[in-house]
Every structure is written in C-alpha cells, then in structure tokens.
Image: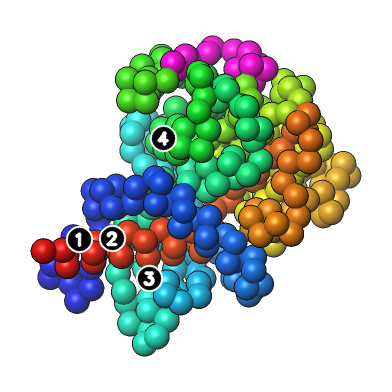
C-alpha cells in the first residue's frame, strides 16, 4: 500500500492478500442482490478500440452506502506470447458516498481476476445441481486458475477437467492446480470429451469463436460463459444459447454486449425474452434459477462495476481493520 498518497493505493499484491475468495464471493453476492433490488439504472460501460484486439474501457457506477460510487478504468490487451501476464490492467477508484472524496484506488487487474471468479461461484451455487461432481475449465490462464479456486468453495468436485488449445500448457496447469487444491485435475485434449463428462463448465478462453458447442453439453449441466465481455467474440455457440435457461448478471448489459446472445438473436433463433432472469432476481427469490435437474443453465458473465466496487470496498475495510488492530 502506497503511503505517500492522500488515500490508500492497493497494488496487485495488496489486492491478492486482502481480497480472499470467500469474502469476495459474499461481497459479490450481496452487491448483485442489491443491484437488482434497488433497480437504479447504472451506466453501460464504454469501450474504445485502441487498435485491433486492444481496448480501453470505462465502467462507472454506484452502490448504496457504505460502499459509495466509482469507476474502473482498464485496458484489455492480448498477452502477446507472455503466459501469466494479465490481459486486464488498470485501476478501480472508489469514492465515499457521504462526502465525495476518494476512498482508495486498487489495481483493476487483480480485482477483476478474483471478483470475476467470485461472480461465477455465486451463479454456480445458485444454478448448478447440488450433486455436481465434475468441473470442466475451458482455458488455462489466470481466470481459469481463479475459477478453480472460487468454484471449489461452492461445490465439491471429485475431479476437474481442463481443456485448452495449448495442450502442454493445459497439462502444466492441471499439475499446478491439483497440487494446490488436492482435487484430481486432468488435462483433456478433446474439448468434446471434456464437455460431455462435465456437470459444470466454465469457458474462460477469450476465444473469438465458439469453443463449446451445444451438442456436446449433456442435460443438467451448468455453464458459466465468461471469456467474452463485449459484443463480438463468442465462446459458446447458438445451439447452446437456445437450449439453455439463460441468466445474465445484468439484463441491460446482456442486451447491449453479450456476444453469444446477440449472435443467436440476430440469427432469429431467440428474442429478448430468452433472458430468463438477472442473477440478482434469483438471489432475491423473485425468479427461480434451475427449474429441473435436466435443464441446461447458462450464466452470462459480462462483469459489472457494482462487483468491482463491492470487492474494493471489502478489501479496503479489511485493510483498515488490520491497521487498527493492536
């Protein structure tokens, strides 16, 4: 934490130390319930293309007291052959609702890494079958790692399957995560095989074209579609969107930027009513999540600023508590 600033600045190491998964999951759960309950229109994110595949985004928003309001300023640039380098870089700025002063600034890359997985954990807890025993991760980057860490907190998989286009990286990822989690983790070279044997699937690849096809997904599966966060790239195909009970973090955001949904809509296969609910409506008990054991559920994670603000508010409170401890 930078001491020369008039307000705390939390770097990546600070964020990873203070933003524990259990606490972040709880913060995101509460934030998404309040987001829907308050029914206050939040601005849509603004995305500027700096160059092909390189983007700058602005996500403003606000929460009820005590969290306040703020924004995330972030660049999304490809890793360019550097595994382990975060694609998301920037800052989250949190302001106090009472007096409008800056409360703190936090590294956006680390916040995004953890809170995105936390949001998927909230959705999985609500939508996946309680007896789900096999988790499949499509991708082997930082989000894949975070999703394993978050999802094992809401389900107890007997095995985890990992698929990625880079087979060697997938094997290395499997070895690391098995050692960390003590859950059997196996790299699978055939994406169809990984999907066909999974109860829960997370797509965290950022692929511009579908890596998960509806015909591979068995009844009763829950899917977290995470890697695409703007209109354009789509990780899952039309058939899976059409076959699913489709639930979004924000209905308004999904109608503007959920690439897989928009592709199916443009093809005339669905209309806006195909969004069954926002995750907050499920949290509040207004709309049911999973309605049968054989239903395929899809949670479309675009990410929302209220998640970032809640995560940063939580980590700042933890830091303040630690500072005041004797």
Chain-order first, disc 4 or disc 3: 3
In which quadrant of the rendered view does residue 254 lie?
bottom right
Chain-order first, disc 2 or disc 3: 3
Secondary element at image label 4: helix
Mark pair 2, 1: CA separation: 6 Å
Mark pair 4, 3: CA separation: 26 Å
Chain-order first, disc 1 or disc 3: 3
Q: Residue visible at 52% across and 60% down?
A: 30
Does 175 appear above or below 282? above
What x and y, as percent, mark residue 55? 48, 53
Q: How is the image coloured?
A: rainbow
Range of magenta residues: 184-197
Q: Split into 4 quadrants, where in the image is the C terminus?
A: bottom left
Q: Residue visible at 44% across and 27% down?
A: 140
Secondary element at image label 2: helix
Eye-nearest disc, 4 or 2: 2
**Residue 149: numbered disc:** 4
Asked whether residue 173 is drawn in magenta, I would say: no
Chain-order first, disc 4 or disc 2: 4
Q: Nearer the viewer, residue 229 or 220?
A: 220
Estimate how packed mark 1 is, as few (under 14), some (14 to 19) or many (20 or more) residues with alpha carbons within 10 Å. Answer: few
Circles 2 and 1 in contact, beta carbons < 8 Å:
yes
Estimate how packed mark 2 is, as few (under 14), some (14 to 19) or many (20 or more) residues with alpha carbons within 10 Å. Answer: some
Chain-order first, disc 4 or disc 1: 4
Mark pair 4, 2: CA separation: 20 Å
Secondary element at image label 3: strand
What x and y, as percent, mark residue 28? 49, 56
* Residue, disc 1: 322
* Residue, disc 2: 318
């Amino acid at each position: 934490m930078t001491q020369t600033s008039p307000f705390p600045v939390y770097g990546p190491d600070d964020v990873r130390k203070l933003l524990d998964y259990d606490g972040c999951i709880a913060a995101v759960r509460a934030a998404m319930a309040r987001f829907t309950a308050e029914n206050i229109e939040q601005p849509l994110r603004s995305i500027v293309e700096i160059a092909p595949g390189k983007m700058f985004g602005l996500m403003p928003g606000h929460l009820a007291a005590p969290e306040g309001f703020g924004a995330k300023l972030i660049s999304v640039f490809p890793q360019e052959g550097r595994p382990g380098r975060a694609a998301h870089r920037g800052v989250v700025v949190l302001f106090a609702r009472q007096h409008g002063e800056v409360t703190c600034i936090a590294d956006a890359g680390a916040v995004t890494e953890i809170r995105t997985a936390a949001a998927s954990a909230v959705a999985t807890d609500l939508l996946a079958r309680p007896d789900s025993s096999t988790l499949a991760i499509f991708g082997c980057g930082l989000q894949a790692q975070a999703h394993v860490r978050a999802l094992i907190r809401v389900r107890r998989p007997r095995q985890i399957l990992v698929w990625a286009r880079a087979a060697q990286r997938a094997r290395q990822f499997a070895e690391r995560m098995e050692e960390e989690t003590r859950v059997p983790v196996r790299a699978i070279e055939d994406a169809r095989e990984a999907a066909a044997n999974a109860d829960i699937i997370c797509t965290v690849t950022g692929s511009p074209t579908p890596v998960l096809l509806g015909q591979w997904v068995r009844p009763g599966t829950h899917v977290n579609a995470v890697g695409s966060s703007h209109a354009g790239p789509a990780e899952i195909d039309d058939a899976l969107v059409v076959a699913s009970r489709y639930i979004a973090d924000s209905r308004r955001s999904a109608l503007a930027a959920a690439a897989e949904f928009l592709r199916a809509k443009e093809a005339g296969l669905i209309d806006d009513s195909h969004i069954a609910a926002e995750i907050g409506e499920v949290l509040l008990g207004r709309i049911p999540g999973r309605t049968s054991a054989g239903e395929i559920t899809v949670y479309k994670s675009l990410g929302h600023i209220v998640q970032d603000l809640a995560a940063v508010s939580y980590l700042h409170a933890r830091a303040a508590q630690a500072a005041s401890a004797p």
